[in-house]
Amino acid sequence: MDARGDRPDTAGIEHATESEALRVELRSGLEGIEPEAWDALVGGDDPFVEHGFLHALETSGSVGPDAGWQPVHVTAWAGERLIGALPLYAKDNSWGEFIFDFQWARAAHQSGLPYYPKLVAMAPFTPATGKRFLLAEGVDHARTVGALLAGARAAADEIDASSIHLLFLTEEERRLAVGCGFKPRLSVQFHWDDAGYATFDDYLARFRSSKRKQVRKERRAVAESHLEIAVKEGPELTDADWEALHRFYRENCMRHGSYGYLTPRFFDAVRQIHAHRLVAAIAYRRGTAVAASINFEKGQHLYGRYWGCLEDHEFLHFELCYYQLIERAIERGITHFEAGAQGFHKLKRGLLPVEIHSAHWIREPALADAIGRYLPSEAFQVKAEIAALHDRSPFHRG
């Protein structure tokens, strides 16, 4: 144990094979890293840690010093070849993360300890599970992850960060992080997974009768509202569609009193370099968009992100944010759909509760000990909640 808290295992930063040594560098942004080299590390199903998405956030000012998300990406190199990366951000607040640590910050403050700045590894503002340790094929996972975490610790030391938070990890990444001294944490979300459905009606056949009737009632109400519904991919969107998506995003933030993290320039940047990943479910009245959901798709995964409307219609949110997307997933052979954070109403539409993984390193020993004692009881409660929610699913039992 270090005098200032349990240290992540830093052996990886100096360890080398006979054939090549690892070099770890911290980057204040993706500028200067070739998109092809970065994206070769990403994998087939995650659009949010691709160079295009993260770079759009940076160049649009959605992240940066003024936004409270300062990039400090950790990169691992073998010679001139990029073989590993950890998208990492220095933060002076806890907003936009969706795995909440406000109580931890409050406890630190009450103990006279600074909690900010801290370091967070995730795609900003995006509560979607995916790879955080971006690794080239064929590399030693444990060794390269150790090197990346050593780089994160070096970044923490450089700015005297209180903590490092790895959010929305895969299960394998959680195990690797715990092996390097991080404390695991459980949260819950609602996800949809394909079970070999041929049609949406085939999907509804799994529902209990009363739940199936409710879904059909909701869809029928939208169908009778004289709205035209269209699901469009990014390249199909018109200028008016793009303007509407940003307007809906802004209006929804204002309606709910939340901060609009994404700037207008972000939508312009996505249109230019990441539109092929975007899917919008849009409701039109006489050719004018009145509501939409903004989603992203890659490989066999689909992710719901934002919703907004200019007109209030009962059940339209469910149609554009769930039913249209599940229908698309079934038709296109997409196996996994995540509809964002929170929302117990998702359970009634067939999205089931799943465990969400994160891992945390706290510098100050007393705070680390208190959090370490709290996390197992929190995990027990999360598991119990998931079990209880499964008992309330709309599907036939057995």
Image (spheres, rainbow, N blue to C red):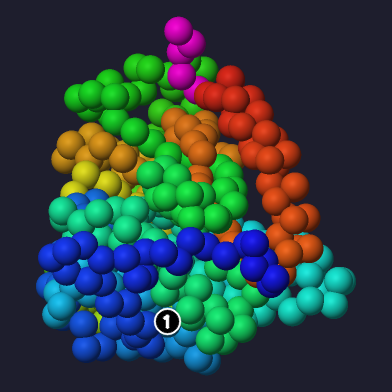
Image position of 363 with respect to 368: above or below: below
Count of marks, rendered view: 1
Q: Position of residue 245 (x, y in %)?
A: 36, 71
Q: Amino acid at mark 1?
A: Val
From the viewer's perspective, tell me whether residue 85 is left or right of residue 128: left
User: What quarter of the picture does the C terminus occupy?
Assistant: top left
Residue in the picture at 25% in, 54% down: 140
> Which percent across, then down, holds residue 157?
56, 81
Q: Residue at x 59, y 40 (%)?
A: 344
Prevailing secondary structure of the magenta residues: loop
Residue 137 in the image: above or below residue 121: above
Mark 1: secondary structure: loop
Magenta region: 394-398
- As for residue 105 lying within the magenta part, the answer is no
State the residue position of label 1.
72
Q: Residue furthest bottom?
A: 66
